[in-house]
Image (tube, grey):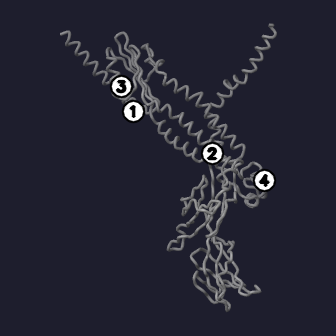
Amino acid sequence: MTTDRSFLTKLSGLGSAPRRYFKKELLPLLADLRLAIVLLLAIAVFSISGTVIEQGQSLSFYQANYPEHPALFGFLTWKVLLIAGFDHVYRTWWYLALLILFGSSLTACTFVRQLPALRWFTRNTSKFYTQPRQFQKFALSAEFDSASLDEAISLLEKRRYRVFRSGETIYARKGIIGRIGPIVVHVSMMLILIGGIIGAMTGFIAQEVAPSGSTFLIKNIVDAGPWAEPQFPKDWAVKVNRFWIDYLPTGEIDQFYSDLSVLDNDGKEVDRKTIHVNEPLKHNGVTLYQADWSIAAVQVKLNKSPVLQFPMAKLDAVGSRVWGTWIPLKSDLSDGVSLIARDLQGLLLIYDTDGKLISTVRKGMSVQVKGVTLAIADIIGSTGLQIKADPGIPIVYLGFGLLMISTMMSYVSHSQIWALQKDGKFYIGGNTNRAQVVFEREFLELLDQIGEQQQTLDSNIQLAKV
């Protein structure tokens, strides 16, 4: 029987071992400020690396920009980038693990340090000082031969202190919101972390280049989280009604615009907006940004032919954006000219097969080229759209909003004042957690008022004796 009882005792001890380890070892470690600082620095460093190193690019891009010989900094090659996950930093298991560990540290610090401290500051019944020697520990304290506890309470209430009384002792405080501020800071940072993790796991980024008048489905996904598929648009498409560019008198681009319509499966327009840089279209949690532009095609007429459309391709040019196409002038394709365009303002350069500039022409005009009348009907532009879906954004915004509020809350000083009336003496002392100079000035003014009341009381007593 004794053996059985000993076995059960050991068994229950084994069952409580993980709880003891969590409470006495793991929880204090997570709540350690030094660990939180190290984790925050690590997150900052890897976040910077994700900003410096291009994310979500193709294999050929990394091979061209991070070659093995010579390796960047002697070790950073495309193989290292891909193996370590630096091509998608914010979705790697180790980056998410850092976020979760940092969130755990914040949570532990909140429950181990912040909440107990707040409970102590709000537990007013245990805050009364009943011995004169307790007032000696304050940097700011005073002793009066006689003073009224009721008058002190009145003076404190006028200064917006919340006063608690127990017999011949009082405790007063104000600015308790300053003690709540750090807790709200932790909550706001937790929300930011949660929103970031949700966005990394369920969000996606796509890019589309669509000519004016075309309709497309969002399929060119360049980066997506492992749980992002439900966010992909499946029941609506986007139509580019028109794309155009406004130019400055100097010829530089002022702004480029895209008139976009969202179409359902039946082709019915359910949303429409003209977007430009910093003014996107948002639909069903997906945001379409104006990011780039291109020239898609040129429409021409040769003599009396119908309007013919030729696609234009971007050409490699140093320091400029140039698009070109080749226009056949004979049915057997034995001769033709090249059309070169730099923008959508309508001017095209015409080159022969030897690369010699032979003429220029504008949209809506015609020119004679090798016995053929070449008329430019239109230049069709393409809009470059960056498309994002991030379900965690509202949570992140909420977190940042609370962070700003909590920062202001943390600047509020938490001031405390104690007073005791005992053996014909009046003792008073106080402290604050910040704005020490302001509190000292306030405390000295309070002492002056109490001293004046004492003088008045002494004068009344002397008159009564006379």
Contact flag, marks 2 and 1 (Cβ < 8 Å): no
Say whether disc 1 or disc 4 marks the residue closer to the N-terminus.
Answer: 4
**Taking 219 as reference, is 421 above or below it?**
above
Q: Secondary structure at mark 2?
A: helix
Extreme front residue here?
Answer: 266
Say whether disc 4 or disc 3 marks the residue closer to the N-terminus.
Answer: 4
Pointer 2 residue: 196
Q: CA distance from mark 2 to mark 4?
A: 27 Å
Q: Which of these two is toward me, 387 or 123? A: 387
Q: Residue at x 69, y 26 (%)?
A: 22
> Can residue 75 be seen in this snapshot?
no
Q: CA distance from mark 2 to mark 1?
A: 40 Å
Q: CA distance from mark 1 to mark 4?
A: 60 Å
Q: Secondary structure at mark 3?
A: helix
Residue type at numbered disc 3: Leu
Residue type at numbered disc 1: Val
Pointer 1 residue: 438
Badge number at residue 156: 3
Q: Secondary structure at mark 1?
A: helix
Contact flag, marks 2 and 4 (Cβ < 8 Å): no
Q: Does 26 sit left or right of 437 as displayed?
A: right
Q: Residues within 10 Å of mark 4 (few under 14, many from 20)?
A: some
Q: CA distance from mark 3 to mark 2?
A: 46 Å
Pointer 4 residue: 79
Q: CA distance from mark 4 to mark 3?
A: 69 Å
Which mark lies nearer to you, 3 or 1?
3
Say whether disc 2 or disc 4 marks the residue closer to the N-terminus.
Answer: 4
